[in-house]
Image (cartoon, rainbow, N blue to C red):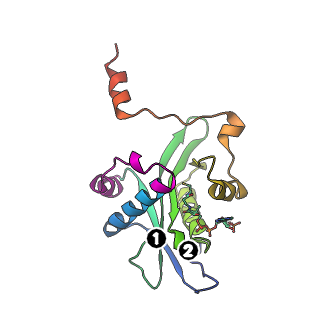
Amino acid sequence: MNNTASDSHKKEEIIIRRAKPKDSPQIFQLLLDLAVFLKSGKDVVLTPEEFHDDLFCEPPKCQCVVATTAQESDTIIGYSLFYPVYSAWKGFSLYMEDLFVKPEHRRKGVGKLLWQKVTQIGLDMGCKGLRLTVENWNKTAKDMYTHHGCVDLTEALDEHPMYLNKAGMEKLVQEV
Ligand SMILES: CC(C)(COP(=O)(O)OP(=O)(O)OC[C@H]1O[C@@H](n2cnc3c(N)ncnc32)[C@H](O)[C@@H]1OP(=O)(O)O)[C@@H](O)C(=O)NCCC(=O)NCCS
């Protein structure tokens, strides 16, 4: 798969690669920027240290690919986080948790290259599909995903993602 793209204006070469341990502070800052974009900045309770350990422990709890330019190969301009999930009906898939490109680097093909890289990793791992969630108001991302074949499961199956926080988990296991 070709992991490079050229900006028609600046002719920047884009590099997509696996995250390295030294990248984690920059990725964490972009993760915070994405949370603010999603109007959820105050909901981030993960620490930079926890994030680093989750990415680089063995086996990793979460995986990450990053985008840089060839000219500034240590500066992260976008990232995607993903991890394996399993469906009893469909089998093994990847869940793409985050996809984010710095505002000044958007519309140059970087987001699509990151998404393609995650998709290729999934295919190489034998995935049956790729799962992701997008806010209903995020028209740019929603249009991008549907344009490339993603099916809206809330519309198609009336599925609603659910979440139990740690306090809820602890309460549940204590109930007799
Ligand atoms: C969504 C996002 C990752 C796209 O990244 P990007 O680098 O600008 O996207 P690309 O340049 O690779 O474009 C990918 C496709 O989306 C389309 N697209 C991207 N931004 C668009 C916009 N503002 N308006 C219309 N189309 C747009 C492109 O035309 C392209 O279409 P194609 O695949 O048919 O050629 C980026 O806008 C972003 O980080 N947004 C904020 C975070 C976010 O919404 N993340 C996704 C949900 S978690």
Residue bounds of the magenta highlight: 36-59
Residue 143 belongs to magenta span: no
| Circle number at residue 17 | 1
The residue that mark 2 highlights is: 3
Q: Residue 67: where, in percent of width, then height?
A: 48, 71
Q: Please, what secondary structure does the residue beneath circle 2 have?
A: loop
* Residue toward you, 122 or 68: 68
Query: What's the residue at 30%, 57% (across, down)?
Result: 48
| Circle 2 crowding by C-alpha within 10 Å: few under 14, some 14–19, many from 20 | some
Query: What's the residue at 32%, 27% (across, down)?
Result: 170
- In this rendering, the answer to whether 13 lies above or below 174 is below
State which quadrant residue 115 falls in: bottom right
Mark 1 and mark 2 in contact (Cβ < 8 Å)? yes
* Residue toward you, 96 or 92: 96
| Circle 1 crowding by C-alpha within 10 Å: few under 14, some 14–19, many from 20 | some
Does 2 sit left or right of 29 as displayed? right
- In this rendering, the answer to whether 96 lies above or below 117 is above
